[in-house]
Image (cartoon, coloured by chain):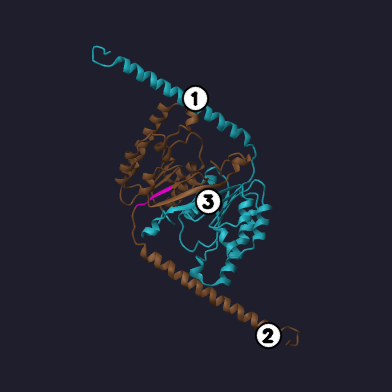
Chain colours: A brown, B cyan
Amino acid sequence: MTDNNGTNTKGVSNNAENEQIRQQRHKQRQQKLQQQVQQGIAKATVEKGLLLVITGNGKGKSTSGFGTVARAVGHGLKAGVVQFIKGSWECGERNLLEQHQVEFAVMATGFTWDTQDKAADIAAAEQVWARAEQMLADPAIDLVLLDELTYMVSYHYIELEQIVRALQNRPSAQHVVITGRSCHRTLIEMADTVSEVQVVKHAFDAGIKAQRGLDW
Amino acid sequence: MTDNNGTNTKGVSNNAENEQIRQQRHKQRQQKLQQQVQQGIAKATVEKGLLLVITGNGKGKSTSGFGTVARAVGHGLKAGVVQFIKGSWECGERNLLEQHQVEFAVMATGFTWDTQDKAADIAAAEQVWARAEQMLADPAIDLVLLDELTYMVSYHYIELEQIVRALQNRPSAQHVVITGRSCHRTLIEMADTVSEVQVVKHAFDAGIKAQRGLDW
């Protein structure tokens, strides 16, 4: 059956009807989904300072930690950052966040293969950890990023018990983010949220240089 | 054998000697490691605009993307952000980064289960994608974050071919970061660096509310 213009009117009407049915089904599916989501949200009522751990071998752990700091600062919260290992070179995040009253404590020794001096590394670790302890005791600080802290535990530079104690005794509303590979299982057990970043592939392995603004 | 103070001098001397040997060994190991690292760095000579994909179900993908933007901005680079899905609510990162001349294009529809209107969602997606295409054609923009773009592909809101074309034709020095779950394999193949963020645990599942400054 065709109309004057040769269009299959039955087809058109069927198509329009089908489209309406599809839209109706989409709406029903989304309403069901919304209900599930809302039930989840209704159950999640606790508000407290959280411990986040971002571990694994993939790229993006520290960046995610700094992204959280940027987010907190964007809401007018006060954040402190303690950088273990890194910090002997320029750092884009620091340039930006220090303009927003984020307090930085930096170990600034660089990698162990560059210092080649364990005793000096330990002394530097203890010094910067003392700054971390101050932040973890300060209720005026809403969020503390302990960037690459995990290595301090695996290298035995800082005692795990010291870290656990400082985390447990911190102000109850204070959030803490810990980043670094191979996070100790005790910290993972203590944490509220744990993400593991895995490498699928990495540009560096394909001969691509670490680049300013992207990698540091 | 003891000295006048009853100290085992042989033991003391042995301990000092052992400590020296340990330090020497540490230094040798670190020197070898340094050599390996430097060889790796020497091989990595290419500089170009990279495509980073941060996918997986874990927390920290968007945050990592925004951390990269903060890093780039901290070096004085120019960044643009396109937010798909999200954006109908306040966002700490945006508050901060807009103060630093970061351009934002926001789909601002919220989740599909809240809009329940596929046609309107597609129209909004196409509109914000047009902004993304402009950024991906602009050599003055050093870094483009396409936050939650992956869903636009899996929902069939934006054609994969369109995205691939825009990425391929972008200025050669421009970096792009794509975040979101279930990234399409074609984008993963195109990417220089791919990280997959996996959930080990999530506070929300333990009844803890999404919190300002930490979760949004």
* Residue pictured at 50% horizontal, 61% vertical: B87
Q: Is residue A2 left or right of residue B80?
A: right
Where does residue A151 sit, x and y in percent of width and height? 43, 38
Q: CA distance from mark 1 to mark 3?
A: 35 Å
Q: Nearer the viewer, residue B45 or A33?
A: A33
* Residue pictured at 65% horizontal, 39% vertical: B46
Label 1: chain? B
Q: Bounds of the magenta span?
A: A49-53
Q: Report if the CB atoms under discs 2 and 1 are less than 8 Å apart.
A: no
**In the image, which disc is placed on residue B28?**
1
Q: Amino acid at mark 1?
A: Gln
Q: Is residue A51 magenta?
A: yes
Q: Report if the CB atoms under discs 3 and 2 are less than 8 Å apart.
A: no
Find numbered disc 1 in the image and state the secondary structure of the residue it sits on. helix
Label 3: chain? B
* Image height of A111 relative to A78, above or below: above
Q: Is residue A112 left or right of residue B129?
A: left
Q: Residue furthest top?
A: B4
> What's the magenta bit mostly, secondary-structure-wise?
strand
Q: Nearer the viewer, mark 2 or mark 1?
A: 1
Residue A180 image-quadrant placement: top left
Disc 2 crowd rating (10 Å Cα; few below 14, some 14-19, many 20+) is few
Determine which residue is flagged by label 2. Answer: A10
* Image height of B19 relative to B155, above or below: above
Q: CA distance from mark 3 to mark 2?
A: 49 Å
Q: Earlier in the sequence, mark 1 or mark 3?
A: 1
Find numbered disc 3 in the image and state the secondary structure of the residue it sits on. strand
**In the image, which disc is placed on residue B196?**
3
